[in-house]
Image (cartoon, rainbow, N blue to C red):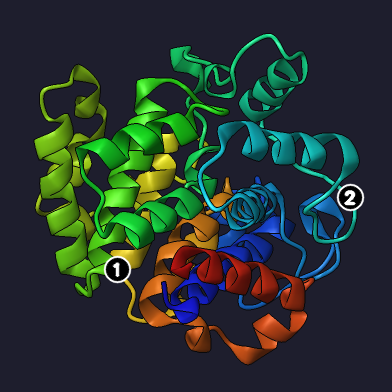
Amino acid sequence: MDAKIVKGMLLGLATGDALGVPVEFESRTTLQSDPVTGMRGDGSWHQPAGTWSDDTSLTIAAMESISRRGKLDWQDIAENFLSWYERDEFTANGVRFDIGNTTRSAIVRFSRRILPPTKCGSTEEYSNGNGSLMRILPATLYLYGTRGKIGADELKIIHDFSALTHGHIISCMACGIYSLIAAQILDGKNLSDAFKLGMNDAQKFYGEDDAFKNFSRLCDENFAALDEDDISAAGYVVCTLEAALWSLLNTDDYQTLALKAVNLGKDTDTTAAVAGGLAGIFYGAESIPTEWLDTLKRRDYLEQIAEDFANALTK
């Protein structure tokens, strides 16, 4: 796989994440009066400007494992997640400062060495936060890069990757839908067509499952025309998927996309990370404002992770 694609994905995700960190949990009303226009410091987590969170940490933890092992090794990926949780590895500043409850519980279950990694994610319906969606792209790129498609067999693997932390079908399906749209972007489609074709594939693969009704708004041909007031940016995985895709469909460049996603409020870092990963693939790393990239923590490290990952897919 072209290293430019991987670099665009990772820097796009990490930059969106870092833009959102200082205002995570802020309401949309608050951000309307003081919108994010670039990198900020302090704020919600009292971190320096350009600091990325668990969204990026878990993404690169997965990428490092795939690069080193040359495959999707659930045990090894989960070990990397545990290293992040217990020893602050794969972090922007040497300190882990953000983690969702469902992700924490899954990693703790894994640490007890009782369950296999893909059985550690909760299957309870209340455990459908966005913690697997935010770090699914390494599996998507690996599968697309090695198999050239995301089909039924690949979706089963996507579901297993989600289940490392989030095992309910709604979370798994959200990751699958996102991956199907990503595959269309990787095929060279424009964003509008990628969304439509990805959702057509989603209906084909998931349409008979009752859980797919949770994604009915994404199947509406007028989804992109929804008013901003109709879009929630809460941590529920369906809300995050909708907010990220709506932002993507209503902007024409990375900068506008990232700011729109962040200024929706609430789970700002994850909405922008999920949107930013796809935008980075489509627009490329060169589309990200230079001043943002210059502020991004451990940028050289992120670029090396991306290069190693791309190289692993070409062996």
Q: Is residue 12 visible?
A: no
Please determine whether, in this image, residue 253 is positioned above or below residue 97: below
What is the secondary structure assignment of the residue under circle 1? helix
Measured from the top left, where is residue 100 in percent x and y? Answer: 66, 32
Label 1 – label 2 distance at C-alpha: 34 Å
Residue flagged by tag 2: what amino acid is it? Val
What is the secondary structure assignment of the residue under circle 2? loop
Report which residue position mark 2 lands on. 95
Residue flagged by tag 1: what amino acid is it? Leu
Q: Residue at x 61, y 48 (%)?
A: 62
Image side of residue 98 versus residue 205, left or right:
right
Image side of residue 5 versus residue 228, left or right:
right
Q: Is residue 24 visible?
A: yes
Q: Residue at x 21, y 59 (%)?
A: 224
Image side of residue 167 versus residue 194, left or right:
right
The label shown at residue 176 is none
The count of marks equals: 2
The reply to whether the C-beta atoms of the residues labelled 1 and 2 are less than 8 Å apart is no
Report which residue position mark 1 lands on. 186
Please determine whether, in this image, residue 308 is positioned above or below residue 43: below
Mark toward the viewer: 1 or 2: 1
Measured from the top left, where is residue 1 in percent x and y? Answer: 41, 72
Residue 213 figure quarter: top left
Most foreground residue, 107 or 269: 107
> Which residue is most to the top?
114
The residue carrying pointer 2 sits among few (fewer than 14), some (14 to 19) or many (20 or more) residues within 10 Å by Cα, namely some
